[in-house]
Image (cartoon, grey):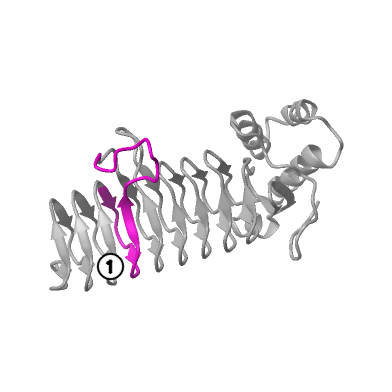
């Protein structure tokens, strides 16, 4: 098996464990404890701070910083905490920043096969799923949860403790301080004005489930029902998996779900 390749200008300090064929480019700084899986490449001038675990086949572009202390004035930056755990197959473009957790038990968690574009940021204690795309300048505050296959436009902002449901799409420059249910589209700040029909189809979702999601969106936002009455209507179809998913999402929401009123952006499928 090929040995790791470390450029002579790279600096590795502390406990740094590199799997076979890991490539560490020029000017990189790794301050352990750090574990990096096979096939991961640091192209150059990246700074990694442990505790940090990186899975296999990640690609890290210049000026990325991973595992630095949280931007929390209550947290001692000298305290390692639970750190940062990253899965496999992720791409981190230039100047992406992801901070470690303000916890001694649970790290900031990044899943697999996510694409982080230039200047994207995930704060401490975030939980990111897999297959997501974060466009340039996306800002995820501390404790944000993002489920699988979510997509953000450029310069999107997400408030602390918010949840972004699976298969959602967030229009560029918009912000949210409420939760966005699965497959809904953020078409204005805190407005879920449409469904991500393209995302549902590309995910292989069956037509009956897509139709059920349409019905959920109409029931929540287009029939003039109060929140409790709309939720009760959803419970009448709780035997359908996609409807049950929406019920669970809404009932577990700590910040409330986005509103449904607002002008849909071009290219969306408003209900």
Residue that appears at 44% across and 44% down: 126
Q: Quadrant of residue 198?
A: bottom right
Q: Is residue 237 toward the left or the right of residue 36 in the image?
A: right
- Badge 1: few (under 14), some or many (20 or more) residues near its Cα, within 10 Å? many
- The residue at the far right in this view is 224
Magenta stretch encompasses residue 60: yes
Q: Is residue 179 toward the left or the right of residue 96 in the image?
A: right
Residue 88 appears at what percent x and percent y? 35, 56
Magenta stretch encompasses residue 77: yes
Residue 76 appears at what percent x and percent y? 29, 38
Q: Which residue is mark 1?
A: 41
Residue that appears at 39% across and 65% down: 95
Residue 256 appears at what percent x and percent y? 65, 34
**Camera-side residue of 170 and 205:** 170
Q: Is residue 139 above or below residue 40?
A: above
Residue 91 appears at what percent x and percent y? 40, 64
Element carrying mark 1: strand
Residue that appears at 25% across and 53% down: 49
Q: Is residue 251 toward the left or the right of residue 119 in the image?
A: right
- Magenta highlight range: 52-79
- The residue at the far front in this view is 73
């Amino acid at each position: 098996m090929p040995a790791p390749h470390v450029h002579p200008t790279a600096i590795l300090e502390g406990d740094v464990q590199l799997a076979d064929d890991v490539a560490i480019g020029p000017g990189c700084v790794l301050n352990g404890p750090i574990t990096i899986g096979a096939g991961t490449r640091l192209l150059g001038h990246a700074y990694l701070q442990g505790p940090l675990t990186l899975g296999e086949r990640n690609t890290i572009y210049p000026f990325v910083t991973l595992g630095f202390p949280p931007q929390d004035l209550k947290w001692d930056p000298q305290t390692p905490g639970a750190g940062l755990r990253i899965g496999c197959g992720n791409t981190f473009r230039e100047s992406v920043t992801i901070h470690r957790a303000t916890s001694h038990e649970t790290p900031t968690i990044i899943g697999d096969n996510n694409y982080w574009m230039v200047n994207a940021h995930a704060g401490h204690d975030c939980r990111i799923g897999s297959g997501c795309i974060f466009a340039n300048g996306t800002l995820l505050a501390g404790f944000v949860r993002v489920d699988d296959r979510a997509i953000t436009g450029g310069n999107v902002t997400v408030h602390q403790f918010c949840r972004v449901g699976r298969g959602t799409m967030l229009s560029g420059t918009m912000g949210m301080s409420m939760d966005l249910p699965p497959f809904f589209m953020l078409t204005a700040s805190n407005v879920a004005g449409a469904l991500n029909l393209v995302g549902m189809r590309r995910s292989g979702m069956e037509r009956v489930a897509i139709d059920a999601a349409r019905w959920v969106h109409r029931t929540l936002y287009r029939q003039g029902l109060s929140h409790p009455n709309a939720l009760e209507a959803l419970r009448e179809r709780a035997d359908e998996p996609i409807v049950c998913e929406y019920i669970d999402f809404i009932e577990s929401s700590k910040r409330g779900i986005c509103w449904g009123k607002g002008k849909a952006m071009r290219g969306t499928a408003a209900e």
